[in-house]
Image (spheres, helix red, strand yellow):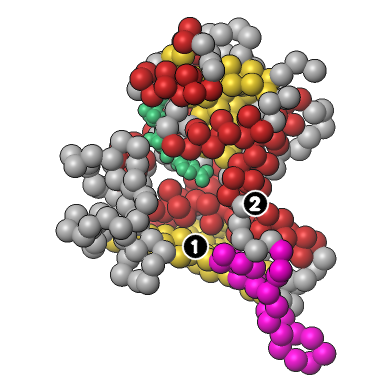
Amino acid sequence: MNKLKIGIVGNGGISQLHAMSYQAISDRAEIYALCDINKERALAMAARLGVPAERVFDNVFDMVKLPELDAVDVCTWNNSHSECTIAALDAGKHVLCEKPMALNATQAKAMKAAAERNGKHLQIGFVRRFGNDIEVLRNLAADDYFGEIYYAKVNYTRRNGCPGGWFSDKSRSGGGPLIDLGVHVIDFSRYLMGNHKPVSVYGASFDKLKNRPDVRKTSGYFSSDAASSDIYDVEDLACGLIRFDNGSVIAIDAAFSLNQRGDRGDMEFFGTKGGAKITDKVELFSQQSGYMTNTELCFPTSFDFNGSFIAEIKHFVDCITVPGTVCISPAEDGITLMEILDGLYESARTGHEVILG
Ligand SMILES: NC(=O)c1ccc[n+]([C@@H]2O[C@H](COP(=O)([O-])OP(=O)(O)OC[C@H]3O[C@@H](n4cnc5c(N)ncnc54)[C@H](O)[C@@H]3O)[C@@H](O)[C@H]2O)c1
């Protein structure tokens, strides 16, 4: 079988993990072309990966003209996901697009329409769906461990973790921690709870601490374009409630800056028969023979970050090359996530609940 020829657009931080993942399945895919508006960055990555300089571009419209290119992996800032994805689909390429799918649901719908009119595969980079921890929880759910999961509390908050650069510039990111971090845990929990349709949201956002300009940075969260001249016009904390058509609810907290002990990334799921909490381990709360029980899983002991990217990219290649493969993270779910985020930002702005169509 011919190897799938991949072009990666956006050659910054996360693209390195995507590249590592294609290399892990180098018998099935090869990184054939690279593109970044920062050409120096693209050339440096090409030198590391052995991609010839004539296949390095600074404009996605030029890269997608390569007739032999099969697929494009979009790892740019959020504001160009839509443009790069549609350019690639209209040039007849399949696309894997990083999360969040776009800046808003309108852009996301245009991307799905482009995939449909060109008959090409469009997958969204909801990498947590490919994690070893959700695999455990989905196996438990399939065995009816939870009963009905009717409530989830998901928290992705940092004490001093605004990466700066494009992350804090709303024109390029679309927002702060809600669209950057919240998207992971909202999608993860919605997926585990059965992918129900959201019907309403209520949200609030704050910019009280901003990017803590007066505090020395102690964490490792730095954008690759962070600079002292950074724009900071995004929220530093967002919280919200998302209600689904089966009556279930997800409560979300996402923060770049918050006065709490350290950083948190925990998710709790509450079912009629049992509950679970994911931190750096998986804990289960249930009952046995009339007694309340707490159980800690021996394996997996923690979320395998690199492994989840390899699984995501292997699935992307499967979807394109293995007939009958059903996409685990389709465009449709990317749109739903953007509708939830649009609604939460709108609710935070107006102070009212937003009913989702
Ligand atoms: N799945 C995850 O866990 C995860 C983690 C980090 C980032 N991401 C997502 O990946 C994307 C990139 O994030 P990052 O941290 O790698 O950012 P980054 O700034 O390190 O890299 C992005 C690169 O895209 C380039 N770029 C921007 N617009 C472009 C365009 N129109 N054409 C070509 N190149 C363009 C920039 O010059 C930059 O080199 C974001 O959407 C982010 O949300 C996902």
Closer to us: 218 or 90: 218
**Residue 155 appears in the figure:** yes
Q: Is residue 171 magenta?
A: no
Residue 265, which numbered label?
A: 1
Percent of width and height locating residue 345: 38, 53
In reply to whether residue 291 is colored magenta, the answer given is yes
Q: Is residue 184 above or below residue 10?
A: below
Question: Which quarter of the figure has residue 271?
Answer: bottom right
Residue 324 occupies quadrant = top right
- The residue depicted at 49 percent of the width and 62 percent of the height is 265
Tell me which image quadrant ligand 1 sits in: top left
Q: Of helix, strand and loop, which one carries label 1?
A: strand
- Residue stretch rendered in magenta on the structure: 276-299
Q: Amino acid at mark 1?
A: Gly
Could you give the CA–CA distance between mark 2 and mark 1, rounded to whole angstroms?
14 Å
Q: Nearer the viewer, residue 40 or 10?
A: 40
Label 2: how many Cα within 10 Å (few below 14, some 14–19, many 20+): many
Residue drawn 71% across the image and 56% down it = 135
Tell me the tag on residue 33.
none
**SS for tag 2?**
loop
- Identify the residue position indicated by label 2 in the image: 131
Asked if residue 108 shows in the view, the reply is: no
Residue type of the residue flagged with mark 2: Gly
